[in-house]
């Protein structure tokens, strides 16, 4: 057999054809083989159903097809047409063709078992010497793809000669055929073993069913609500207990051996005699008739009789089902009540139960049985809550029911249901005493409604209420703080501006007042800028401008800018750059990186009174990890969770030691996340803090404007 020979398979019967790919192959093992094949041949791979829907996960799909062409409406439609062509059943060899969407080369091999096409193994997404790059770029324009992105992705598509790709395709076809043969052999073996097991089980089940059928028939007859009798050649040979009661007989000997006609009222004997002849002459069941029987005590009873021909002890016999019609109206009323009860029990979505005085179930409805994981409601009879719930919940229910039995009072409550095998839930339950016709309490019954979703909604509502209250409190604190922060520099500006009007001020005094006014103005400008920035962030209007920037230039500038202020406080200032200037290039928003570093260094200066401040970055995989470390006051554990939130500060009172709007860290966090990084803090109260944040080093951000 060559690589392109069709796979020979003997015919298989219809029962064998009722199988699918998942019945024959282990999906994890097939995925592993597909990944190995893809890695070894450098071609993209996927296995699909005959209709083209995927079975396995794609292996080594190129970005050009997966993320660019298939993301366009025209490109995706062409891809689907191409996949449909490759998915045709072709037992003679692989299908090799350029993709209808882009022109890359693809191939497909059918996987068939016993002549049934169950899957396709598709490969491709490669270029060869025939690939026309200009036509591909023209196609990019036709489908509306980004030309630059398309060209970059095309350059990364694997290159393989036509002859090599054909060899790979033929190897795939041979490999698929081998898989099909092995799967078919396994299927045949599995079917043989299954049939042998079925035959053995069927014989055993037949014997057991026969015994059970005989026992069930006897129990059914003995416990029937109707009178049952069997006669052979016109004489009674069997009666059940109900028949003894109906005919006022003390035992079966009083009836067995006697002629059936002895018990038929004279007025009905001609009719019954004719029926007996008809049923003896054929095997058909006669329609039931109403007649009268004469009991042993001479009284007459109205009955409905149904006659069925049977074999009894290898002799032709007639099985009589006799219903006492004097109770017809009562039975009809009971049947109607039973029908209504069954309709109620089987269709209500609520859980309904009845229990005896020992708190054992005597009946539950279908919905309750399903909640217990039972197939039929009858499976719960005789069991207690301890069989289905945890000890604590079952004990609580048991005490409730004993109280109801002793007091005769109903109980209405909401309770959490803790089951052994199912998720916890909440129910609203009404429990009542079960009272018999004599007024005695003989147990309890109840109905429960599932209110789990209502409880979840209440919890969520409470959370939202608390969140809203917290938001109002924070906004109130923020507004009070803003009022304080704005009034303070404003008072400085107005106050010292007024002092400048005083005559006779020396030049030094004037300069001192002017410096205070400038400092107050700068402080107010910073507050206003923070408010504008946080408003843009909240509304999603903050723009990100991506460009190449040298991070060493920024850190060096910040070091030079803040060094005099830090050394003036008597602190040591240290900068550590991990990369040389030529490698310290980031694709990011330069101004936002500057704002982040400035905010964090300012915070370190504000809260550090002795020791040192150190900042810089390290290279961690494909990102830079920045750090700002100080020996200042540190942050208590309870404040670490909210210092990055808007409007939050370590101290939120107006008489706090340090000035500030409480927006710096939240703005920095928002900037970092917009730039694709994250921020966190490690700190110990009284020993200092280290703030870390990361930025992508390889520059995945390529657009020149982003929104939050």
Image: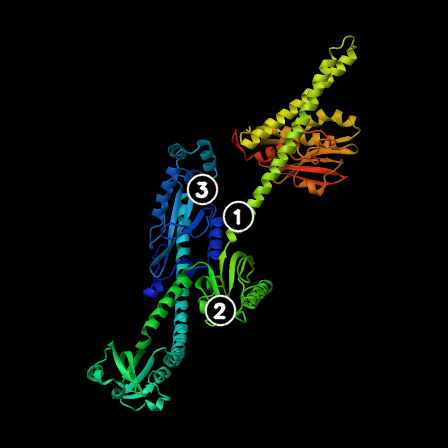
Q: Is residue 77 left or right of residue 411?
A: left
Q: Position of residue 9 (x, y in %)?
A: 34, 62
| 381 or 202: nearer the viewer | 381
| 579 or 79: nearer the viewer | 79
Which residue is outermost to the top?
Answer: 504
**Above or below — where is 25 with respect to 218?**
above
Q: Where is residue 321 in the image (x, y as percent from the top left)?
A: 30, 79
Q: Earlier in the sequence, mark 3 or mark 2?
A: 3
Q: Is residue 178 visible?
A: no
**Mark number displayed over residue 435:** 2
C-alpha span from label 3 to label 2: 71 Å
Q: Is mark 3 on a helix, strand or loop?
A: helix
The residue at which mark 1 appears reads as 457
Q: In which quarter of the image is residue 298?
A: bottom left
| Closer to the eye: label 3 or 1 | 1
| Closer to the eye: label 3 or 2 | 2
The residue at which mark 3 appears reads as 66
Q: What element carries label 2?
A: strand
| 453 or 577: nearer the viewer | 453
C-alpha span from label 2 to label 1: 38 Å
Quadrant containing the C terminus is: top right
């Amino acid at each position: 057999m060559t690589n392109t020979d069709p796979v020979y398979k003997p015919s298989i019967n219809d029962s064998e054809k009722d199988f699918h790919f998942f019945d024959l192959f282990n999906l994890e093992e097939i995925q592993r083989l597909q990944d190995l094949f893809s890695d070894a041949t450098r071609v993209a791979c996927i296995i699909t159903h005959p209709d083209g829907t995927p079975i396995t996960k794609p292996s080594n799909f190129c970005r050009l097809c997966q993320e660019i062409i298939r993301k366009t409406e025209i490109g995706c439609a062409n891809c689907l047409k191409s996949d449909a062509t490759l998915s045709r059943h072709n037992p003679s060899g692989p299908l090799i063709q350029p993709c209808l969407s882009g022109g890359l080369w693809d191939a497909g091999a059918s996987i068939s078992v016993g002549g049934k096409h169950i899957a396709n193994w598709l490969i491709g997404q490669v270029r060869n010497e025939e690939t026309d790059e200009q036509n591909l770029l023209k196609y990019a324009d036709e489908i509306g793809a980004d030309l630059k992105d398309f060209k970059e992705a095309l350059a990364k598509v694997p290159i393989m000669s036509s002859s090599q790709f054909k060899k790979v395709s033929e190897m795939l076809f041979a490999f698929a055929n081998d898989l099909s043969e092995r799967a078919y052999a396994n299927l045949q073996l599995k079917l043989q073993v299954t049939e042998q097991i079925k035959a053995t089980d069927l014989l055993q089940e037949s014997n057991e069913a026969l015994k059970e059928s005989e026992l069930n028939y006897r129990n059914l007859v003995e416990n029937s609500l109707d009178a049952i009798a069997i006669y052979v050649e016109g004489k009674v040979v069997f009666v059940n207990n109900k028949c003894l009661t109906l005919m006022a007989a003390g035992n079966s000997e009083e009836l067995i051996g006697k002629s059936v006609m002895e018990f038929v009222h004279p007025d009905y004997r001609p009719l019954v005699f004719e029926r007996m002849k008809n049923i003896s002459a054929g095997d058909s069941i006669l329609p039931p008739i109403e007649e009268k029987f004469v009991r042993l005590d001479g009284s007459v009873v109205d009955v409905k009789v149904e006659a069925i021909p049977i074999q009894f002890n290898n002799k032709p016999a007639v099985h009589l089902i006799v219903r006492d019609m004097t109770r017809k109206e009562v039975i009809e009323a009971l049947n109607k009540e039973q029908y209504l009860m069954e309709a109620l029990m089987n269709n209500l979505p609520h859980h309904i139960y009845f229990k005896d005085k020992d708190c054992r179930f005597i009946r539950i409805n279908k919905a309750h049985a399903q909640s217990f994981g039972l197939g039929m409601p009858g499976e719960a009879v005789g069991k207690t809550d301890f069989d289905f719930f945890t000890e604590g919940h079952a004990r609580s229910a048991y005490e409730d029911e004993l109280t109801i039995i002793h007091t005769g009072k109903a109980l209405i409550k909401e309770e959490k249901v803790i089951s052994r095998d199912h998720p916890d839930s909440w129910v609203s339950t009404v429990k009542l005493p079960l009272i018999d016709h004599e007024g005695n309490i003989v147990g309890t019954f109840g109905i429960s409604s599932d209110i789990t979703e209502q409880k979840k909604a209440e919890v969520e509502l409470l959370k939202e209420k608390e969140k809203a209250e917290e938001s109002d409190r924070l906004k109130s604190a923020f507004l009070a703080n803003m009022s304080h922060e704005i009034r303070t520099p404003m008072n400085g500006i107005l106050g010292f501006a007024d002092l400048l009007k005083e005559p006779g001020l020396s030049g030094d005094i004037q300069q001192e007042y002017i410096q205070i006014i400038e400092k107050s103005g700068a402080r107010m400008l910073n507050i206003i800028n923070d408010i504008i920035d946080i408003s843009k962030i909240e509304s999603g209007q903050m723009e990100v401008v991506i460009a190449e920037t040298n991070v060493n230039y920024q850190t060096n500038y910040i070091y030079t800018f803040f060094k005099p202020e830090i050394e003036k406080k008597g602190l040591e200032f240290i900068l550590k750059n991990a990369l040389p200037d030529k490698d310290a290039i980031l694709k990011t928003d330069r101004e936002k990186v500057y704002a982040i570093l400035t905010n964090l260094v300012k915070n370190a200066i504000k809260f550090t009174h002795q020791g040192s401040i150190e900042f810089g970055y390290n290279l961690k995989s494909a990102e830079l990890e920045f750090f700002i470390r100080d020996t200042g006051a540190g942050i208590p554990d309870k404040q670490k969770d909210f210092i990055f939130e808007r409007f939050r500060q370590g101290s939120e009172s107006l008489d706090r030691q340090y000035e500030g709007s409480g927006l710096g860290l939240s703005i920095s966090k928002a900037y970092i996340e917009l730039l694709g990084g994250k921020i966190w803090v490690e700190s110990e109260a009284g020993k200092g803090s280290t703030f870390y944040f990361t930025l992508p080093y390889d520059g995945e951000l390529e657009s020149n404007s982003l929104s939050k």
